Image: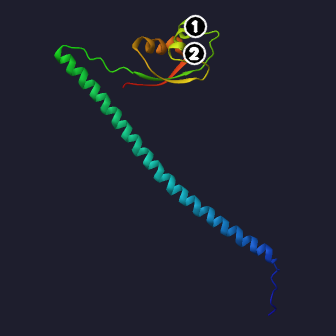
């Protein structure tokens, strides 16, 4: 029998094929590791979200309990109001309504995008938080009760 000669493949091509196969294997391995890591991360995030949901539900139940207790006694329950506000001025002083223009000095908003933590009295807080007007000049990003 006559032996058939296989066509010769250059050594560089063989090396390149081998290198590409190794790279593909590493990529697949990295994808598997990343998928496992993402799955673990999502589980942690989900657990944290469940904790927050439970916390907010507990707070709602507590508010409802306090309200019912007050009604049983014949009283009124007034929830805590926010005392601290994180206020950002989002527009200049020109062409805004007079009310927020008067409020800006109270919150010490001197320029656009000026940010202040404002511990406020009831009147100032109501003026800043007044819905029709605050959107035109000042934005309360967060407010908390102390």
Rendering coords of residue 120 (x, y %)? 43, 18
**Residue 122, image quadrant:** top left
| Numbered disc 1: secondary structure | loop
Q: Residue furthest top?
A: 98
Rendering coords of residue 7 (x, y %)? 82, 80
Q: Which sits earlier in the primary sequence, circle 2 or circle 1?
A: 1
In the rendered image of this protein, does residue 83 appear above or below residue 103? below
Q: CA distance from mark 2 to mark 1?
A: 8 Å
Near mark 2 (Cα within 10 A), the count class, few <14, some 14-19 or many ≥20, is many
> Does residue 15 appear left or right of residue 34 in this picture?
right
> Does residue 32 appear left or right of residue 66 in this picture?
right
Rendering coords of residue 102 (x, y %)? 53, 8
In the rendered image of this protein, does residue 30 appear above or below residue 67? below
User: Which residue is tagged 1?
Assistant: 97
Near mark 1 (Cα within 10 A), the count class, few <14, some 14-19 or many ≥20, is some
Considering the image in quadrants, where does the N terminus appear?
bottom right
Residue in front for this viewpoint, 40 or 141: 141
Residue in front for this viewpoint, 21 or 74: 74
The residue at 54%/17% (across/down) is 138
The residue at 27%/24% (across/down) is 64
User: Which residue is tagged 2?
Assistant: 137
**Residue 61, image quadrant:** top left
Rendering coords of residue 13 (x, y %)? 79, 73
The residue at 82%/91% (across/down) is 2
| Numbered disc 2: secondary structure | helix
Residue in front for this viewpoint, 75 or 47: 75
Residue in front for this viewpoint, 78 or 98: 98
**Residue 98, image quadrant:** top right
What mark, if any, has residue 108 been given in the picture?
none
> Does residue 56 appear left or right of residue 98 in this picture?
left
Considering the image in quadrants, where does the C terminus appear?
top left
């Amino acid at each position: 029998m006559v032996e058939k000669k296989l066509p010769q493949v250059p050594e560089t091509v063989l090396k390149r094929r081998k290198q590409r196969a190794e790279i593909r294997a590493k990529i697949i391995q990295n994808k598997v590791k990343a998928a496992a890591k993402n799955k673990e991360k999502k589980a942690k995030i989900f657990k944290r979200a469940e904790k927050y949901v439970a916390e907010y539900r507990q707070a709602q139940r507590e508010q409802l309990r306090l309200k019912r207790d007050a009604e049983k006694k014949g009283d009124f329950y007034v929830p805590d109001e926010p005392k601290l506000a994180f206020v950002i001025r989002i527009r200049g002083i020109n062409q805004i309504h007079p009310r927020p223009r008067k409020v800006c000095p109270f919150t010490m908003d001197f320029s656009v995008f000026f940010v202040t933590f404002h511990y406020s009295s009831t009147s100032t807080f109501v003026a800043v938080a007044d819905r029709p007007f605050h959107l035109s000049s000042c934005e309360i990003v967060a407010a908390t009760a102390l």
